[in-house]
Every structure is written in C-alpha cells, then in structure tokens.
Amino acid sequence: MRNVIAVYVENKYGVLTRVSGLFMRKGFNIDSLTVGETDDPSFSRITITLNGDDYAREQLINQLKKLHNVKQVKLLEQGSSVERELLLVKIRNTPENRNEIMAATEIYRAKIIDYTTSSLCVEVTGEPSKINAFIEVVKPLGIVEMCRTGVVALERGDSILKK
C-alpha cells in the first residue's frame, strides 16, 4: 500500500539524516523523498512516499514523532491531498520520432525546455500517475536520461502542517 507522509521539521543540520536513517534502521525503502524550506526559513517540510502495510506505517509515524527536531508528522490521505511531481526527461530526437514527441508533449501538457538536433529535453509536472504514463509513452522513442523530483503534497482545504 502506497503511503505519503508529511514531516514538519526544524531546518537544522543533521535532521534529514536522522529522518532517513530511521527508515534504514526499520528496513523500509523510501520510494521518494523531497525536502525544502517552508515559508518560515527555520523550518523545512519533508514529503516521503513508501509502500507498507497499516501496522508498519503507524510504527514509522510514531517513531518519526519521537525524533529530535521533528515538530509534526501527518499521513496524507490520497483523496484529501494534492500531489505533484516534476520530471525532466531527455529523449532522442530523430526525424522519425520528432512528431511523436511533439504530440506526447502536447497531450500531457509538457514543455520542451531544450532542443538540439540529437535530443529534446522535456519538462512534465503532475500527479505521479501522469508522470509514469508519459514515461511509458516516450520510452519506445528513446529516453537518453531522466530525473524525477519525487512527490510533493499538501492537504486540501484548511488543514495545515505547522507548529
């Protein structure tokens, strides 16, 4: 089962190491991890996605809450949160596949951000399922290189993760 966990932490040296180390000690693989400063530069927000059952998820959340410098931990429910991810992908550019790449970028509302005679660099943002679908469409065209940011997520409505 896929889980998205938001962690509000003090923006201090070693906090990310302690958080990620907890997952290593418990034997969990992190599918994606994003971290960035919040509107208050003394705090950061970490968004972690991982697979695990209910028991394991609850154990991890409880352990995260005990870590020094962690202010708040929240499980983000799929229907009540907004998730986005960024993909940069370099695709082989040939006269034979150029029209297909252009069509895919239009359909997925992507942007071509770099163009050379041998490759096109495309930016795609959206839900992880959209990113995965775009990758599957362009894979046969020749992915040269790609990089994903990982999921960032916020709860819908008035609920906030702050202390």
Image (cartoon, rainbow, N blue to C red):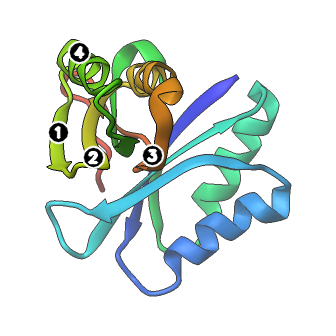
Residue lying at 53% horizontally and 84% vertically, measured from the top left: 14
**Is residue 116 among what the camera can see?**
yes
**First of labels 3, 4 by sequence position:** 4
Q: Is residue 77 left or right of residue 81?
A: right
Secondary structure under tag 1 reads strand
> What is the spatial separation of the Cα atoms under label 2 and label 3, in whole angstroms?
18 Å
Q: Quickly name the residue at label 4.
A: 103
In the rendering, which numbered label is found on residue 112? 1
Label 1 with label 3: CB-CB less than 8 Å: no
Mark 3 Cα shell of 10 Å, populated few (<14), some (14-19), many (≥20): many
Label 4 with label 1: CB-CB less than 8 Å: no
Rendering quarter of residue 163:
bottom left
Q: Quickly name the residue at label 2.
A: 121
**First of labels 4, 1 by sequence position:** 4
Image coords of residue 51 (percent x, y): 70, 33
**Can you tell which of label 3 and label 4 is closer to the viewer?**
4
**Is residue 74 among what the camera can see?**
no
